[in-house]
Image (spheres, grey):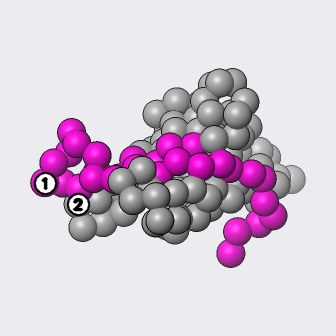
Amino acid sequence: MRLTTLNVVVALLLGSSGAVAAEGERTFLLCAGVSQSDRADAFSFTVTLDVPNAMVLSIGSGEGAVTEAFTDAEIVGRQDVGGGVTNRLTIDRAARTFRLVIHRSQAPTEADDAFEGTCSPTSRAF
């Protein structure tokens, strides 16, 4: 009885962590598009969302995306991918389109490249 009460109190105090969304709360999108600087360069990646908590969990591989906006109209997130490279993703929810802007640390205000395309729901990403 005491252990059960302790578990309930801990759960109420800590709540659920948005960064560790339960498998059922995760939504996976497959996004595919082309480079805006070189139309011959195609790119596809997955996006992991925690919709109930309005969070972008990952953009492409890895974890640690930061949610900038999560509205009925758009989802915006960014993720540092290492080596001074940051990806910033904007998804238009109604049109199911995206824009992925890639920034390098040498010129953080200028986009190094951008990809545009479409996103569609997919099954679990591995």
Circle 1 sits on which residue? 106
| Residue at disc 1, secondary structure | loop
Q: Give the residue type at disc 1.
A: Gln
| Left or right position of 113 against 118 | left
Sequence-first disc among 1 and 2: 2
- Residue 11 locus on image (x, y percent): 70, 45
Q: Nearer the viewer, residue 92 or 80?
A: 92
Q: Nearer the viewer, residue 28 or 24?
A: 28
- Was residue 69 drawn as part of the magenta stretch in this picture? no
Q: Quadrant of residue 122?
A: bottom right
- Give the residues in magenta: 98-126
Is any atom of residue 48 visible in this view? Answer: no
| Residue at disc 2, secondary structure | loop
Q: Are marks 1 and 2 in contact (CB under 8 Å)?
A: yes
Q: Nearer the viewer, residue 54 or 90?
A: 90
- Residue 116 locus on image (x, y percent): 52, 48
Q: Residue furthest left?
A: 106
Residue count near mark 2 (Cα–Cα under 10 Å), binned few <14, some 14–19, many ≥20: few
- Residue 17 locus on image (x, y percent): 61, 47
Label at residue 87: none
| Left or right position of 36 against 31 | left
Label at residue 84: 2
